[in-house]
Amino acid sequence: MKHLAAITDKDITGSDALSTTEPRIAVTAVLFDRDCNIALSYSSKMDIYSIIGGGVDLGEDLITAIKREILEEAGCHCEIICELGLTFESRAEINYTQTRYNYIARVVGEKGELQLTEDELSKDITVRWLPIEEALRLIKKSTPHDYNYKFIRHRDIIVLNEVLTNHAHLIGDSQ
């Protein structure tokens, strides 16, 4: 899979420190519906937007994980269109490392109910369907104060720019 970015505290806080832990494996998808809108997870409690995704469970393969995350966080089934690229994160302040596999996907069938965790429910998470340019604008304009969300914001901007720059031809094909 193509390497998109390595994001470290240097990018977020200016520090040269690096995490020393084994990486958590995670997945993300830029998920298009038939109207060419993408799904964003939105926390009204934190006023934060992010791309759909999460951790890979023990024994789970990457495709099964992203399809599960999409069903939970966007309430729908999907088809994977293509691999987008790999991001790596080193969050030194909390000694956390993550390798994230990013995909482009499209909704299959109807949108349904979200299946959120207690943590997601406590953050008042909903799904918002927006044109990709509007999604990118909202993420760029956000100013998260939370250390972790600063990394998520940085990563999501890189991922959405990759879609717009190198995969724009797929956007119209998502129907």
Image (tube, rainbow, N blue to C red):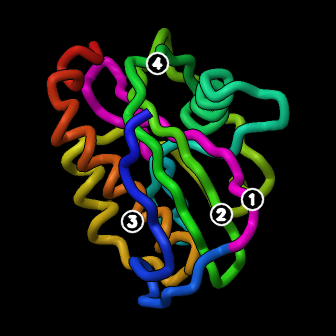
**Above or below, 11 relative to 104:** below
Question: What's the CA distance linking mark 2 and mark 3?
Answer: 15 Å
- How far is the residue under mark 4 from the one under mark 2? 26 Å
Secondary structure mostly seen in magenta is: strand
Q: Residues within 10 Å of mark 2 (few under 14, many from 20)?
A: many
Between circles 4 and 2, the one closer to the viewer is: 2
Dot 3 amino acid type: His
Residue 121 visible in rendering: yes
Q: Which mark is residue 97?
A: 2
| Residue 154 marker | 3
In the image: residue 136, left or right of residue 75: left
Judge left or right: residue 139 versus residue 24.
Answer: left
Q: Check disc 4 and report the residue beneath it.
A: 80
Instruction: For the C terminus, give its image quadrant.
Output: top left
Viewer-closest of 135 and 156: 156
Q: Does the magenta segment cover residue 105?
A: no
Disc 1 from disc 3: Cα separation: 21 Å
Residue carrying label 1: 22
